[in-house]
Image (spheres, rainbow, N blue to C red):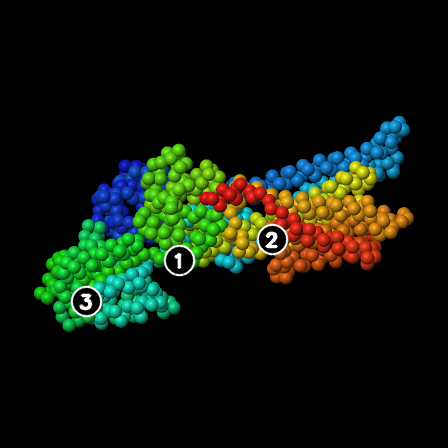
Amino acid sequence: MLIDDLLPGDVVHLAVGDQVPADGLFISGFSVLVDESSLTGESEPVDVNEGKPFLLSGTKVLDGSCQMLVTAVGMRTQWGKLMAALTEGGNDETPLQVKLNGVANIIGKIGLFFAVLTFIVLSQGLIGQKYHEGLLLSWSGDDVLEILNHFAVAVTIVVVAVPEGLPLAVTLSLAYAMKKMMNDKALVRQLAACETMGSSTVICSDKTGTLTTNRMTVVKACICGNTVEVNDLLIPSSLSPKIPGIAAQTLLESIFNNTGGEVVINQDGKPDILGTPTEAALLEFALSLDGKYKQKRQETKIVKVEPFNSTKKRMSVILELPGGGYRAHCKGASEIVLAACDKFIDDRGSIVPLDRKTADKFNGIIETFSSEALRTLCLAYKALEHGFNHEEIPLQGYTFIGIVGIKDPVRPGVRESVASCRSAGIAVKMVTGDNINTARAIARECGILTDGLAIEGAEFREKTPKELLELIPKIQVLARSSPLDKHTLVKHLRTTFNEVVAVTGDGTNDAPALREADIGLAMGIAGTEVAKESADVVILDDNFSTIVTVAKWGRSVYVNIQKFVQFQLTVNVVALLVNFSSACFTGDAPLTAVQLLWVNMIMDTLGALALATEPPNDNLMKKAPVGRTGKFITNVMWRNILGQSLYQFTVIWYLQTQGRYIFGLEGSQSDIVVNTIIFNTFVFCQVFNEVSSREMEEVNVLKGLSENSIFIGVLTGTIIFQFILVQFLGDFANTTPLTQQQWLLCVLFGFLGMPIAAAIKLIPVQPRKEDDKHTAS
């Protein structure tokens, strides 16, 4: 029967290796173990029985067989809903794009207004004269040429004012950041994602594989009454002296024989472990104790195996020993296996009776392990003195070997990275399919769960929109969550709370949330292809610490674009004021069309190249995030723009009115010399202002300048070309060669802008309200 023919009400037989074709209910069967990682992201298999009867489409049967009653097919299944969610959203403009569009529109309108005003002021003299002479309809070639010159100046003002270099600056900055992020183990799939991460206010992180290593490991063990922390590097040295030889051999025999896993040798001659995560953790622990898997398996013969099942909660095996006789080994739920023991191996290697006091001590150790979110397993054995005639495996009379505590350990550096996010004003929330106790413990270990809430997906789903409004800001951990819970949380954070949300994930189950988020971060090693396709950035080393690096680069991009806009607006304001005021008071514009276009080139292309490639610094992660509602042009930027514009305008207006007297100029050439000095001073003001724009708040703008070869190259190229333009291209640029004294004064006026800019930065400004809001949160 084809999967397409299934309908609700049909009964399907499932066996080991089958993929569940639809959502349904368990009717009958035995030892059914299902891998739900494709939906939940959790690698630990799930038992399905009468008590937990739900089978979901897309999951795989690992063990057992059963009959299932189909309840939902196609797009109505959990898998179908997951795929449907992938097609929603994901095409919104980034927060920066929205802000830049607004800035560009405002600048363009101001430029157009001044251009029209300048044209009217420049032309009104000629038109007025024609009107008074009664020659309004009689125009000579010279008159038309004069009007065209006025129109060219007006058009040039529009060209200078319209920030066509803004897209170039953004693209350059993003491309530069993208290349550098690749070196920091982050592959950017969507260019705009570079800056979006810099605005992020919330990170919703998956637990398994992102915060943790996604590799179950024995982290604590109690052998012969001694409890030790297990470290990969220190296992032999920390455990071997504390375990008597007989106990160590019995422990290895138990782990290597009583297992559903297997150790195989790969092509490189190294051992590979096959089996469930829990079995793999135990086998890895035994191998680290210098255990020889093949040798141990060959020493004994397995006579009977009783696989793990959810009723008995233990797995048992009967071994035939090489010298004759039989031995039973048992492992499983700690309380159950310990209750079946009446003896234990003490620290001298002797087998002694298990009294109430010792049993209470072991139960206390089990509780301690459990409180630390460790999955505990107890190991025990029993010597079958009367032989074994293929009867039932004994349930009582075992000798206690030890307890192991297994968990998926937190990745190194995660706690520090979460702390960095907190100091940067970015809230981190954990969303996981794991149980709430494990989620709480891992969240506390990572520093995510502080004074917030940890709730389960089932409770989250039952909340009304009004209750979610109060609940979502307090949630720090969402456990036992379905893919659609994560999608709902992200959607509410983005729309209702106006947060800029970054989502991390590795499984297909994370894909809808990755698509819905402002920026999706998929894991490169553990991530599925569906997750990577839905993400904007792929974290190549699967490390949460790399996400903090992405955020730092994102902020760097945002700040670099702000620096460029500050620099560009200063040029705009001065150019508009100079030409407009000159047109009003003298009837002529000192900066010609060619000169303004050269300034425009410095300002747009070269300025973008210089300021967009500034590398990030550590101070970026000490500031509050900008978020979705933060102003792009801040009060600090306005202070710098207006202060520097006032200085430059004062200098140029002074040169325009007093230039002839300062330099002792007379005759017909005095006008072109003064205009050349004004043009040269204006360009050098921009050159030194470009250096001042490297920092918006810091006085020391020369820090790290020697390391930025692109910046130095742009400044050098600008100065060289300016010299050529003034000294040798007079006919083209409408300039005349200047003397050494005049050059020196132009450079001095430009240089004075730097101490002026430093003094302006000392003027305190009111911080943005958005900063206060995010710092408080």
Sort mark 1 into few (<14), some (14-19) or many (20+) by Cα contacts within 10 Å: some
Q: Amino acid at mark 2?
A: Glu
Which label is found at residue 352?
none
Tag 1 and tag 3, C-beta contact below 8 Å: no
Task: Residue at 80%, 48% (x, y): give it.
Answer: 655
Seen from the viewer's position, the closer of residues 361 and 16 is 361
Q: Earlier in the sequence, mark 2 or mark 1?
A: 1
> Quadrant location of residue 109?
top right
Residue 82, relative to residue 307: is it above or below?
above
Residue hosting label 1: 411
For the residues labelled 1 and 3, the Cα–Cα distance comes to: 35 Å
Q: Amino acid at mark 1?
A: Arg
Q: Position of residue 301 (x, y in %)?
A: 19, 67
Of the two numbered discs 2 and 3 in the rendering, the one whose residue sits closer to the viewer: 2
Task: Residue at 32%, 38% (x, y): give it.
Answer: 72
Q: Amino acid at mark 3?
A: Asp
Residue hosting label 3: 346
Left or right: 774 as drawn, with respect to 654: left
* Quadrant, the N terminus: top left
SS class, disc 1: loop
> Quadrant location of residue 719?
bottom right
Q: Position of residue 699 (x, y in %)?
A: 62, 54
Q: Earlier in the sequence, mark 1 or mark 3?
A: 3
> Quadrant location of residue 653?
top right
Residue hosting label 2: 698
Q: Position of residue 770 (x, y in %)?
A: 52, 42
Seen from the viewer's position, the closer of residues 573 and 177 is 573
Q: Position of residue 269 (x, y in %)?
A: 36, 69
Of the two numbered discs 2 and 1 in the rendering, the one whose residue sits closer to the viewer: 2
Left or right: 668 as drawn, with respect to 692: right
For the residues labelled 2 and 3, the Cα–Cα distance comes to: 67 Å
